[in-house]
Image: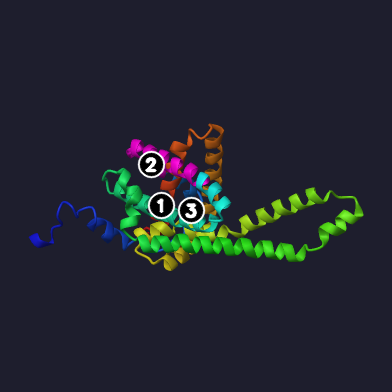
Amino acid sequence: MSDLTPSPAMRHKVPRSSRNHSLTQLRSVAAVNGIKWIIDAFELFTRSAGTWILIALFLGFMFYAWILLTFFSMLLGLSTPLSIAGSIITSILIGGLMLGCNTQRQDHALTFSHLFAGFDRHGGALSAVGLFYWLGTVAIFLTVFSIVIQTGHGQVPALAAGGDVNPLAHMQTEFLSTLLLALAATIPMLMAACLAPALVVLGHRTAFQAMGLSFKACLVNILPILLWAVVTLVLLLIGLMTLGIALIVIGPVLLISMFTAYQDIFSSP
């Protein structure tokens, strides 16, 4: 029996694997659980608040650096490769944080290195999730804009000839409405991506399987997902009202809530 006892270095891996294989049964949960995910996430946050705040500050720095890089990449014509890289890296980082959340759930300490754990473990599948999300989102945007352009071709000159409508104002309105329509059309991609990193690193699914399960989970639990989304938007608005200061707490809590949602939806009944 002694040869079956894990070494101290491996003890954190064994319970994770055995427990993750049971977290594959999709179930429907109550609508109010959308709030419970955030409450449970805050409880996990308080266990390692200092580490989570450090991670949040680092991610904030990365976000602003990415905005700066995006500006220069547009000038150099490299915006597409950068956006693909951003989507892939985001997926990998979230996967690492899901591993960190699982470590906390097992009463182990969260470390800053968990942020990069996805690069060492499941990096290929997480990269595929990020790539599939980028491809799907771009395809939806291009489709929506192409349909609007084709159906609306010639309307602006006709309106301009009538003299009753400002062509520039009309074009701005059309662009904004098309953008909102495209954003709404990407909701299925968000549904496919929100739980996918957790399903990859904790449920041991391929990228395609994880995104399919994530979409199905969100569809089956559409009411708690909608409630979670509304609360998330409110918290983000609060964070912005504090000039971003509150986001060092709100940001990690919302990230952790992806893990608590996964645990709730895919836990054994």
Count the numbered circles shown: 3
Work out how far the residue at label 2 is from the one at label 1, CA to CA, in angstroms.
11 Å
Q: Which residue is mark 3?
A: 30
For the N terminus, give its image quadrant: bottom left
SS for dot 3: loop
| Amino acid carrying mark 1 in the image | Ile
Above or below, comparing residue 129 to residue 103 in the picture = below
User: Does 53 lie within the magenta span?
Assistant: yes
Q: Is there any visible trace of residue 101 in the rendered image? A: no
| Amino acid carrying mark 2 in the image | Ile
**Left or right: 55 in relation to 111:** right
User: Does 189 lie within the magenta span?
Assistant: no
Relative to the observer, which residue lies in front, 201 or 149?
A: 149
Q: Which residues are magenta?
A: 41-67
SS for dot 2: helix
- Residue shown at 50% from the left, 61% from the top: 133
SS for dot 1: helix
- What predominant SS class does the magenta segment belong to? helix
Q: Which residue is mark 1?
A: 94
Pick whichever of labels 3 and 1 is earlier in the sequence.
3
For the C terminus, give its image quadrant: bottom left
